[in-house]
Image: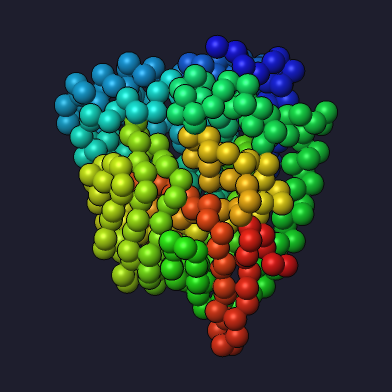
Amino acid sequence: MKMLTEEQLGKYAEVLLWGLKTARKGKFKKNDVILVQYEPAAVRLAEILYERILEAGMNPVQRAGLTVGMERCFYAKADNRQIVFRAPGDRELIEHLNGRIFLRAPGSLTHLKDIDPVKIGKFLISRKPLREIMDRREEKGLYGWTLCTLPTPELIRQAKTTSRSYTAQIIKACYLDHEHPVRQWETIHKTVGGIKKWLNSLNVKYFHIESSNIDLKITPGRQRKWVGISGHNIPSFEIFLSPDWRDTEGVYHANLPSFRSGNYIEGVRLTFEKGVAVKIRAAVGEDFTVKQLTMDPGAGRVGEFSLTDKRFSRIDRFMADTLFDENFGGAYGNCHIALGSSYMDTYSGNPADITKALKKKLGFNDSALHWDLVNTERKTVTAHLRSGEKCLVYDNGRFQI
């Protein structure tokens, strides 16, 4: 089902290639290896990207994702040995990748609702070593990645809207309605750079996030920096850091629903004590949520804290897709936390110094999970500075710079 025109798909490809180039610390060169992963409904955009990567003198490698039926069959019938099986060559490919573009176009969002979440967790844990290889290559400037979402009937159905409305939101959010969308992204990238510089200049002891359903303390920790709009996600308007998980205290509530690993979850409410989610509640999908947040020791800890300024995001409706929902602009912007793994690009020191021991010492979280949970309520975020002063950094959906 084609919803974007050839011209719009061509612009999408331009923006994705800009995102890939921006996301990588090092420069791309001829003969680099670029993986194009795509779900079945995204094949036309994959073809366009394949051609452009070839024209740039690089080597595209394509991988089609599982169909809904294949994925359901895998989790229903695979035994413990098959769940953790990795195909010959997977590790070798990952060790030589210079770039990766993932085209999301889900055929179903709830097809795994009857699968034991523990089984899904085992699969994620088995893939963690491959992700760690990519993380190390990214830290060295050898690798970059980006991703996007294309409209599908399932996304439209779950978002309770029409094909025209859903597709229009993607076009608007990614600036595909502009003659030169990359120029728009470059402008946003530059503007947000000033906000990140301001945030990073504050000597913050902790942030206090308050809304009608949130009362949470987040401690950035030592040697942290705010990052964002780095090209990794298209679209992306968020500014975020990976805090010191050990000092997270209070209550967080996700008022937007979430689709995770083929399951629907709504109304997640978490209570943190000494950095760990000690109370886990959900209006819908609580059993799944509890099992996800206990899949490994780091799954119930905060790996990311993020804020989106409504002045930049053109997303103003629920999209049933985390990529868009975590960048919601609307009336009050949004914040989200991610449970699970930290992002090491929020480390302010030399990436070459990063070791597992240093990560642990600084309170960067480690997990096979990374699950974004979004709140779009009106909120304030107050920085409590080490000087004893307070600074309002975010209110009414805007950074207060």
Q: Position of residue 125 (x, y in %)?
A: 29, 42
Taking the view exactly as shown, the residue that stands out farthest to the right is: 179
Image quadrant in which the C terminus is located: bottom right
Quadrant for the N terminus, please.
top right
Do we see residue 353 in this rendering? Answer: no
Q: Is residue 183 above or below residue 228?
A: above
Is 19 placed above or below 151 here? Answer: below
The image quadrant that residue 382 belongs to is bottom right
> As drawn, is 268 to the left or to the right of 57?
left
**In this view of the protein, which residue sits in the foreground, 93 or 286?**
286
Residue name at image x 54 percent, y 27 percent? 161
Left/right of residue 35 with respect to residue 75 in the rendered view: right
| Rendered location of residue 206, percent (x, y) | 50, 75
Location of residue 13 in the rendering, given as x and y in whole percent from the top left corner: 68, 25
Q: Residue furthest bottom?
A: 388
Q: Position of residue 128 (x, y in %)?
A: 35, 42
- Front in this rendered view, residue 12 or 176: 176
Camera sees residue 379: yes
Which quadrant of the structure image shows residue 358? bottom left
Residue closer to the observer: 161 or 259: 161
Q: Residue at x 55, y 79 (%)?
A: 384
Which residue is located at x 39 percent, y 28 percent? Answer: 109
- 370 or 367: nearer the eye? 370
User: Above or below — where is 301 with respect to 151?
Assistant: below
| Identity of the residue drawn at 26% across and 60% down | 279
